[in-house]
Image (cartoon, helix red, strand yellow):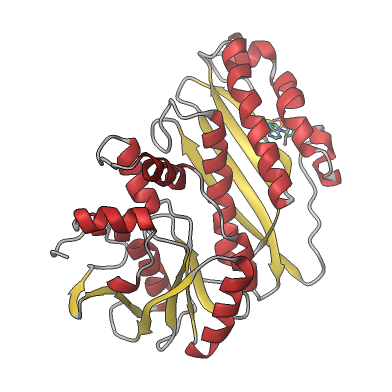
């Protein structure tokens, strides 16, 4: 950190000291990574296994934009690390390490800093333990604006073995992992826009919104099997649409095949228009991928191995203009151009 033109050293980050914050909260997270150089050097060192490529992705979350400012530090850590690891999963990469940049509100006093950073760092430690990753560096600054956090995740994949978006082929089948739309319904429930009668279902849907579970084991197993993949962060239609654009193909999705959780199915049965939110809402962090029909048995085996449903929902077609076509009860309708987030036609 360097002091800004207005002399940022008067705020709590400045008073507590950037060095103090780093050593108290972040240095413990860098143990076990020799290349982190105990966060005492100018940069970190990363070794990649022979014949492997480094895979790099970054995401930023900002208070009141990507999370509500009353969200707990644990949930913010979940979202920040989860979204980054989900990108690695979609590439078929094995996570290795991450960097973390924090812009802490200058208005926070030392008590506020501690109250936020302690549980935040504890949850980061839990993610590290679960996924064998380690913090290797970052930046710590004070900001006059809202709390803002950036993580950069590093992974590795055998050179040439990564899963890309651009390699789907006509004739491939389209699959999704898990269930789709829970997070969109959870967000509606959390923000008071959807009444979910059953308390347990409400809690479960909100957890699906709040806590990404990146499908890393699936991504690793799909190498050499899937022809293309993306994670479902912005919604099934948008993310499958991005595969279509990158691959210059279309996708035809049979809506009845899209896997729904029991709570989502019950909600849609009583309110069919919620299907739109399910197909276009974000934050599921499942994987959508394509594969040759020859791979169907292999994909079924993988689903059993990782105990995660993998459901065929449609197929890839040729065509001059990439599009995602949704078919419902054999009545085809167009979801609009890929990436288009809202339905114009009635479902
Ligand atoms: P510089 O001024 O050389 O960029 P800094 O004072 O910003 O150095 O950072 C010192 C060391 O602490 C660096 O190794 C940096 O990667 C690490 N670091 C700073 N902030 C964080 C953070 N939020 N998380 C992890 N490491 C951090
Ligand atoms: Mg710095």
- Residue 60: x and y, percent? 51, 41
Extreme residue toward the left, this view: 346
- Residue 113: x and y, percent? 60, 18
Classify the position of ligand 2 by quadrant: top left, top right, bottom left or bottom right: top right
Residue 323 visible somewhere in the drawing: no
Above-or-below relation of 337 to 199: below
Q: Nearer the viewer, residue 166 or 269?
A: 269
Who's the residue at 74% across and 51% down the image?
Answer: 132
Above-or-below relation of 86 to 317: above
Who's the residue at 84% across and 39% down the image?
Answer: 37
- Residue 160: x and y, percent? 66, 76
Q: Quadrant of the C terminus?
A: bottom left
Who's the residue at 83% across and 35% down the image?
Answer: 38
Q: Quadrant of the N terminus?
A: top right
- Answer with left or right where residue 329 lies relative to residue 11: left
- In which quarter of the view is residue 162 placed? bottom right
Who's the residue at 37% across and 62% down the image?
Answer: 260
- Answer with left or right where residue 37 lies relative to residue 280: right
Above-or-below relation of 194 to 304: above
Above-or-below relation of 318 to 324: below
């Amino acid at each position: 950190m360097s002091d800004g033109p207005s002399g940022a050293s008067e705020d709590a980050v400045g008073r507590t000291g950037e060095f103090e914050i780093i050593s108290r909260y972040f240095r413990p997270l860098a143990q076990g990574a020799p290349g982190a150089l105990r966060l005492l050097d100018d940069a970190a060192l990363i070794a990649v296994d022979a014949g492997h490529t480094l895979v790099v992705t970054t995401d930023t979350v900002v208070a009141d934009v990507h999370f509500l400012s009353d969200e707990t530090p644990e949930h913010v850590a979940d979202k920040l690390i989860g979204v980054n690891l989900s990108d690695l999963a979609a590439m078929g990469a094995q996570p290795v390490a991450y960097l973390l940049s924090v812009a802490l509100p200058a208005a926070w006093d030392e008590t506020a800093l501690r109250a936020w950073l302690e549980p935040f760092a504890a949850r980061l430690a839990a993610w590290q333990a679960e996924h064998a990753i380690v913090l290797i560096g970052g930046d710590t600054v004070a900001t006059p604006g809202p709390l803002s956090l950036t993580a950069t995740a590093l992974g590795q994949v055998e050179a040439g073995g990564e899963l890309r978006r651009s390699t789907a082929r006509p004739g491939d089948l389209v699959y999704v992992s898990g269930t789709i739309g829970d997070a969109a319904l959870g967000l509606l429930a959390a923000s008071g826009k959807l009444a979910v009668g059953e308390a347990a279902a409400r809690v479960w849907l909100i957890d699906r919104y709040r806590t990404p579970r990146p499908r890393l084991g699936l991504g690793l197993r799909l190498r050499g099997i899937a022809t293309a993949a993306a994670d479902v962060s912005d919604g099934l239609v948008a993310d499958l649409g991005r595969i279509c654009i990158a691959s210059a193909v279309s996708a035809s999705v049979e809506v009845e095949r899209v896997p729904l959780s029991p709570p989502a199915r019950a909600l849609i049965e009583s309110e069919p228009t919620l299907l739109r939110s399910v197909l276009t809402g974000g934050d599921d962090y499942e994987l959508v991928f394509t594969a040759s029909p020859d791979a169907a048995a292999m994909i079924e085996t993988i689903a059993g191995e990782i105990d995660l449903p993998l459901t065929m929902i449609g197929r890839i077609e040729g065509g001059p203009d990439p599009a995602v076509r949704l078919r419902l009860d054999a009545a085809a309708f167009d979801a609009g151009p890929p990436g288009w987030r809202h339905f114009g036609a009635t479902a």
